[in-house]
Amino acid sequence: MTKVDPEVRIPDPLELDRAEEDRLRAVAGLRPIHREPAEYSGFEQVGIPDRPPQTDREREVYTLKEGEMLLNLGPQHPSTHGVMRLVVKVRGEVIMEVDPVLGYLHRGIEKLCENATYTTVLTYVDPMDYLSTMHNEHAPAIAFEKLYGIKAPPRAEYIRALVVELNRIFSHSLMMGFLALDMGGLTPILYSFINRDEIVEMLSAISGQRMLFNFFRVGGVNWDVNDEFLSRLGTWRGHVLKNIEMNEWMITENEIFTTRTKGMGVLSGQEAISLGVTGPNLRASGVAFDVRKAHPYSIYPELEFDVITQERGDSYSRYVQRIAEIKQSIHLIDQIMDKMPHGPVQAQVPGIIRPKPGRAYGAVESPRGLYSVYAISDGGPTPYRFRMRDPSFITLQALPKIMPRRLIADLMAVMASFDPVMGGVDK
């Protein structure tokens, strides 16, 4: 084994780079660069872009006061719930500013949809919010049916409501597990995936796919319910509440969980409205807005349910809100199965649809809030314009509002309580 003389100094890589730079400048006949000796020279510039600020917001975030520094969280999937980068200005462990940087996953789905037939569009929107695929298809289906001037048969509307409520349950179930996971708890996510996998198997039985279902059609749905689906639904319905209660037992009264969520990330109802936040995050702040009630669609006017709200608007309230909505969706599924009529599941629609020139808007209540589609037809087989409002994109702008003066350790827990999905944000 080679012994290292303790008197031998290991050269600093920065010093080696500077020596090489000086050597190259000497070869080129240039003067060596004069440098002031400083142990941490340039440290105050770490993370600051090497270009002028582009906006007032960027100038505010990248201007550092004494004792402040910048941290980059992401862009990677763990903790940031997708390919997102958070530029965090901190003083010690206290957050001073948060700036979400989006666009790392951009796929241009809206433009792809403008070059696809109306039926194909329902396939392209599937991968956006990959935890609420059925809702992704529901909104454009509503908009296209308005453009074409048709209505889905009653049985098809009941099947649509059934599958989207099942989708809502497994999405909210995963939120419970991921919220605990982002705070270091592994077991709850395993229980959440039990419920998720059972529902996915059901939806696979009716659609043929486990994740990107491609089940909705303009004028109805692709398949009727079958015996395998109904058998799995009955078995699941018999024990789903027990699974949810088991997860609640692990999380809801857990001392670590409650300490890290109660009073954290408080978003008032007025702030949520002004920022455009919708869905469970808005209702957890005390605002009783639900698209299914405020702007009824499909068969929801025929079903009995309440708009559940919480009062405090913190991370814990957003968690409790989703548990309440899971139980409400189970109640809705019971009503749907009791009232479902017989009949066809698809209207008479040609393979290539050419709606008359016009425009239409379709909105649904997705697990993350108001998800809507605005489509314009010029009479051709493809949409002339196609635009989507993704609720996760809108919700992320609440982070810079509520995170200052909190600790770095609180950031991921608060963000996870909003349940964003970056596939829709970077559509």
Image (spheres, rainbow, N blue to C red):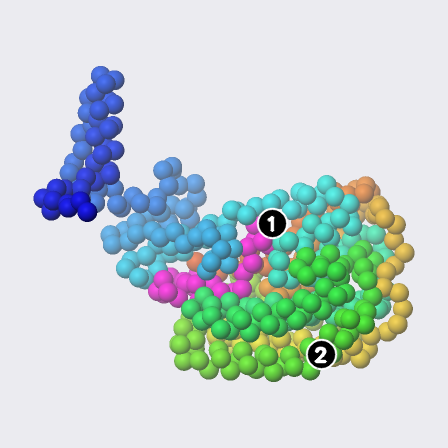
Image point (84%, 46%), residue name: 352
- Amino acid type shown at disc 2: Thr
Q: Is residue 195 above or below residue 143?
A: below
Is disc 1 placed on a helix, strand or loop? Answer: loop
Image point (63%, 81%), residue name: 241
Residue 190 rendering spot, x and y as whole percentages: 53, 71
- Amino acid type shown at disc 1: Lys
Q: Nearer the viewer, residue 287 or 122?
A: 122
Q: Is residue 6 above or below residue 210?
A: above
User: Gap between marks 2 and 1, in whole Å?
Assistant: 36 Å
Q: Quadrant of residue 218?
A: bottom right
Q: Which residue is mark 2?
A: 235
Residue extending farthest to the left is 7
Q: Which of the two labelled residues, at mark 2 and mark 1, occupies the earlier sequence position?
A: 2
Residue 143 rendering spot, x and y as whole percentages: 76, 55
Is disc 2 placed on a helix, strand or loop? Answer: helix
- Residue 190 as seen in the image, left or right of residue 116: left
Image point (67%, 70%), residue name: 199
- Residue 276 as seen in the image, left or right of residue 201: left
Image point (54%, 64%), residue name: 419
Residue 406 rendering spot, x and y as whole percentages: 36, 65
Tell which tag, 2 or 1, sits nearer the viewer.
2
Q: Which residue is mark 1?
A: 427
What is the magenta range?
401-427
